[in-house]
Image (cartoon, grey):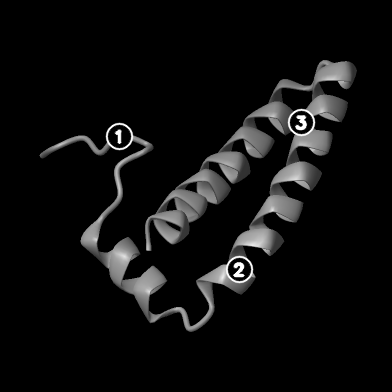
Amino acid sequence: MMKRSAAMVTMEDVIKAFRCRAPEERIPVLRLELDYELALLYEAMMENSVAKMSESKKRLEKIRREMLILEAL
């Protein structure tokens, strides 16, 4: 079984993004989500909460993947 890296984009991801009717509308929303999630990560770091940091990093990775796909279209 092959291990998928976190940044790997599948064909399913590309098809899903391509079917999105307005990627140019989604990108600004993703940027806002990115800013918000970075603020949450900062708060988690200030609280020294490993669990919150981990969750925030997972959400940031999902946002990053979607941004990469949409900006490539």
The x and y percentages for residue 16 are: 37, 72
Q: Residues within 10 Å of mark 2 (few under 14, many from 20)?
A: some
- Image side of residue 67 versus residue 26, left or right: left
Residue, disc 3: 41
Identify which amino acid the numbered label 2 is placed on.
Answer: Arg
- Looking at the rendered structure, the secondary structure element under dot 1 is loop
Give the residue at x 68% y 61%. Answer: 28
- Image side of residue 43 versus residue 29, left or right: right
Using the image, tell me which numbered label, if any, was put on residue 26: 2
Judge whether 35 appears above or below 5 on screen.
below
Give the residue at x 88% y 18%. Answer: 46
Judge whether 14 appears above or below 21 on screen.
above
Identify which amino acid the numbered label 3 is placed on.
Answer: Leu
| Camera-nearest label, 2 or 1 | 2
- Looking at the rendered structure, the secondary structure element under dot 2 is helix
- Looking at the rendered structure, the secondary structure element under dot 3 is helix
Q: Residues within 10 Å of mark 1 (few under 14, many from 20)?
A: few
Marks 3 and 1 sit apart, C-alpha to C-alpha, by: 22 Å
Marks 2 and 3 sit apart, C-alpha to C-alpha, by: 22 Å
